[in-house]
Image (tube, rainbow, N blue to C red):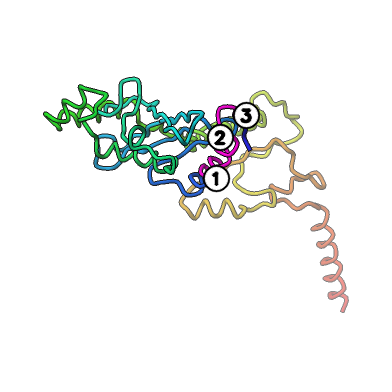
């Protein structure tokens, strides 16, 4: 529990209970900030009531509790600039609840609700801002227009910064593209500057896979109306018996000669019969 020389221990204990209640079930349009180290200063954010010149605004205020609280009322101040008959230019609040109508049995919840109600129904008869009070009584439209202007300038909540998923995705995409470009560049073969032995034939560009036919990806591309990818390679194809397999020539040129000798031997045997 917080300790404070300005307030008696029994008052601090009571305030702790009340602040806990305000935190767990805050009044409409009011959010209380608690400083555990100093209960003599209470901060609150008040939302501008709908249908008033203060709607869509967030007003920060504070209550200063005197040493004799709750026998004496707290003092109220608006920290956010506001154009209101009962609030001075330096933010001091004038309301009967904090003066002659104060009662020690009234708690912080009651005070905060009264202050918010003041934004709904001002009392120009006990004004601290004479200009606002005069405009309110003589021309409400001008008063409302000016109050909205001040609210829009000083009391607008700060917009939340967006993380920018699109920009992050774009950055990631650019990184991937750069990586792919680097890999493609480093893996490219300069055919012009590649020296190939004259005794070894260089196979031409082919649209077939390593097994001699188009792979599944190439077939899907062809069915979609695209062209089969062209891949160039400087690797020598397997050569058996001095003949390139890819040229469609028999790997063993002596095999047909042996078959022919067998056929001639059979013919000679038949002639003897």
Residue at image position (73%, 38%) is 235
Give the image quarter of residue 85. top left
Residue at image position (52%, 37%) is 169
Residue at image position (52%, 34%) is 168
Please report the bounds of the magenta region as a residue range: 4-20
Q: Name the residue under label 2.
A: 172
Point out the residue furthest to the bottom here: 273
Q: Mark 3 points at which residue?
A: 182
Q: Which of marks 2 and 1 is in front?
A: 1
Quadrant position of the C terminus in the picture: bottom right
Q: Give the Cα distance between marks 1 and 3.
A: 65 Å
* x and y, in percent, of residue 5 in the image: 59, 27
Q: Which of marks 2 and 3 is nearer the N terminus?
A: 2
* x and y, in percent, of residue 205 in the image: 61, 40
Q: Nearer the viewer, mark 2 or mark 3?
A: 2
Q: Name the side, left or right, on which 179 lies relative to 51.
A: right
Q: Earlier in the sequence, mark 1 or mark 3?
A: 1
Q: Nearer the viewer, residue 125 or 269?
A: 125
Label 2 close to label 3 by CB (< 8 Å)? no
Label 1: which secondary element: helix
State the mark number for residue 17. Answer: 1
Q: How would you classify the magenta stretch by its main secondary structure?
A: helix
* x and y, in percent, of residue 21 in the image: 51, 47
Does the magenta run of residues contain 264?
Answer: no
Q: Give the Cα distance between marks 2 and 1.
A: 51 Å
* x and y, in percent, of residue 156 in the image: 35, 31
């Amino acid at each position: 529990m917080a300790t404070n020389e300005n307030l008696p221990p029994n008052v601090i204990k009571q305030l702790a209970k009340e602040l806990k209640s305000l935190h767990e079930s805050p009044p409409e349009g009011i959010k209380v900030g608690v400083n555990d180290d100093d209960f003599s200063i209470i901060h609150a954010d008040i939302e501008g009531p709908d249908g008033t010149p203060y709607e869509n605004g967030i007003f920060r205020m504070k209550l200063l509790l005197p040493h004799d609280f709750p026998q004496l009322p707290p003092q109220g101040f608006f920290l956010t600039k506001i154009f209101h008959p009962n609030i001075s230019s330096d933010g001091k609040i004038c309301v009967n609840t904090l003066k002659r109508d104060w009662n020690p049995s009234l708690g912080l919840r009651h005070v905060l609700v009264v202050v918010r109600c003041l934004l709904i129904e001002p009392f120009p008869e006990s004004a601290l801002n004479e200009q606002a009070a005069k405009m309110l009584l003589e021309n409400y439209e001008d008063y409302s227009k000016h109050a909205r202007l001040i609210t829009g300038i000083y009391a607008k909540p700060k917009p939340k910064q967006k993380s920018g998923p699109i920009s992050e995705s774009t950055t990631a995409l650019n990184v991937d593209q750069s990586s792919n470009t680097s890999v493609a560049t480093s893996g490219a073969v300069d055919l012009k500057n590649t020296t190939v032995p004259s005794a070894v034939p260089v196979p031409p560009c082919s649209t077939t896979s390593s097994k001699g036919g188009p792979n599944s990806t190439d077939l899907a591309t062809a069915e979609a109306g695209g062209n089969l990818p062209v891949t160039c390679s400087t690797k020598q194809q397997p050569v058996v018996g001095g003949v390139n397999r890819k040229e469609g020539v028999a790997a063993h040129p002596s095999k047909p000669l042996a078959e022919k000798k067998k056929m001639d031997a059979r013919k000679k045997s038949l002639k003897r019969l």
